[in-house]
Image (cartoon, grey):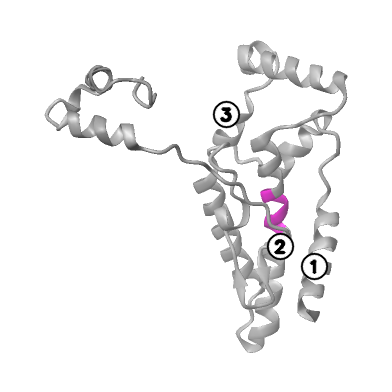
Amino acid sequence: PILNPGTNRTATIQAIEERWPLLADCDLEELAKQLETQKASSASSVKTNIYHYDSIAVICGDAAHATGGVSGQGVNSALVDAAVLVDCLIRHYDSTNKGDSLHDCLLTYSQRQVPEGYALFDLSFGPSPSRLVTKARFAFATARDTLFRGRFGIGRPPLQTVLTTELTPFSEIRRDRNVFYDEDFPDAAYFNQTLAQIDEDSKRS
């Protein structure tokens, strides 16, 4: 009832008192008024094809692969992006050849993280299989995993649990679920080649 526009203010105040008793000393009338005028928010998704531009700029986190909070992996994936970027700089940056080595660092970063962003996007919004058999298989697996959660050797932990408790790359998790999607997730060689071509094209434009 709290965010239901048809609810009267008294009902909203009662709901606040029941659910959050620690707010009893607050001005509940004002709080209810603010809740009534609150507009629903919307979330956006972002899926970019490359995470750097030449040796000039790089993007991480939601700027590169926002899923609108669907997967709950925004902060985690941003931290991984930052760690991978640092790793690429440590491994490839050469202060005696700043321009070229920085460009190589950023291209390598894109080649490592774009697949992760694409995989996270797919995993967050789930498959939309066109075949009825695939839809049924996915529905059965989801129900089984939700019910048993991998216990007793039946099924596996639900996807959200896997995303939040394991260190397995998103791309590996997505490839492991290829059976539920109409298209298999591309391999690393495909991403490396495609991103190198996008990078080369951007330098010419």
Mark 2 or mark 3, which is nearer to you?
2
Residue drawn at 31 percent across, 33 percent down: 35
Contact, mark 2 vs mark 1 (Cβ under 8 Å): yes
* Residue ranking furthest to the left: 25
The disc labelled 2 sits on which kind of residue?
A: Ile
> As displayed, is residue 162 above or below residue 84?
above
- Segment colored magenta: 112-117
Instruction: Using the image, tell me which numbered label, if any, was put on residue 126.
Output: none
Distance of mark 3 from mark 1, alpha carbons? 34 Å
Residue drawn at 57 percent across, 58 percent down: 63
The main secondary structure of the magenta stretch is helix
The disc, 3 or 1, on the residue closer to the chain's N-terminal end is 3
Mark 3 or mark 1, which is nearer to you?
1
Image position, residue 73 (x, y; %): 55, 42
- As rendered, which of 106 and 74 lies closer to the eye? 74
The disc, 2 or 1, on the residue closer to the chain's N-terminal end is 2
Image position, residue 107 (x, y; %): 71, 68
Image position, residue 195 (x, y; %): 79, 63
Residue drawn at 71 percent across, 48 percent down: 118
